[in-house]
């Protein structure tokens, strides 16, 4: 199986790179949110939208079965997907309201960061 080893290693490296980009998506989403929270600016920013797209696309790629040693936990993935869709809805509603009224309700702002952290917690703690 010598010939099989490089292929497997290549897949492993590729998957690790996708996980890295997935974590970068989280870092940008949560980081962008923390910057606004600490600056006492209750608003959503375009960076949060880009970040959630990165998280979604890479998350879906990681959800594919990448070989027998990575049996995806579909319950966890389903919950993460629902949480991400809620974050996406809050971002969408938030930016629309912000554009219309010039301000954003804290009830929309706070759950964005908390749910992002919840998803990262799910990923790291629930294996
Ligand atoms: C805001 C949204 C999200 C955040 C913050 C997030 C966070 C993370 C983090 C930090 C990891 C690395 C943890 C580890 O490897 O132990 C991870 C892995 C992963 N995520 Fe996400 N994620 C998000 C959305 C999603 C979505 C929507 C999906 C699928 C539809 C998904 C699927 C996965 C998968 C399959 C892994 C690899 C887990 C493994 O191989 O053990 N994620 N996520």
Image (cartoon, rainbow, N blue to C red):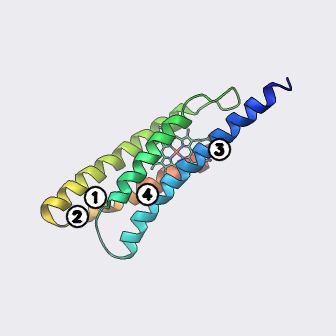
Say whether marks 4 and 2 touch (CB < 8 Å): no
Give the crowd class for mark 1: few <14, some 14-19, many >=20 residues within 10 Å: some
Rounded to the nearest angstrom, the CA distance separating label 4 from label 1 is 15 Å
Q: Which of the two marks, 3 or 4, is nearer to us in this view?
A: 3
Q: Is residue 95 above or below residue 42?
A: above
Residue 104: assigned label: 2
User: In the rendered image, which quarter is residue 35 located in?
Assistant: bottom left
Say whether marks 1 and 2 touch (CB < 8 Å): yes
Say whether marks 4 and 1 touch (CB < 8 Å): no
Q: Which residue is mark 1?
A: 108
Quadrant where the C terminus sits is top right
Residue lying at 36% horizontally and 43% vertically, measured from the top left: 85
Q: Which residue is mark 4?
A: 29
Residue 51 % position (x, y): 42, 53
Rounded to the nearest angstrom, the CA distance separating label 3 from label 2 is 37 Å
Q: Which residue is mark 3?
A: 16
Rounded to the nearest angstrom, the CA distance separating label 1 from label 2 is 7 Å
Residue 36: assigned label: none
């Amino acid at each position: 199986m010598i010939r099989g080893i490089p292929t497997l290693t290549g897949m492993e490296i590729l998957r690790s790179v996708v996980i890295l980009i997935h974590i970068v998506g989280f870092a940008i989403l949560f980081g962008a949110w923390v910057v606004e929270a600490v600056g006492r600016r209750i608003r959503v920013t375009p960076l949060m939208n880009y970040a959630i797209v990165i998280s979604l696309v890479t998350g879906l790629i990681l959800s594919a079965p990448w070989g027998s040693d990575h049996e995806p936990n579909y319950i966890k993935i389903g919950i993460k997907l629902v949480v991400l869709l809620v974050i996406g809805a809050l971002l969408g509603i938030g930016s629309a309201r912000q554009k219309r009224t010039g301000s954003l309700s804290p009830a929309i702002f706070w759950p964005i960061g908390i749910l992002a952290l919840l998803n990262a917690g799910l990923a790291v703690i629930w294996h």
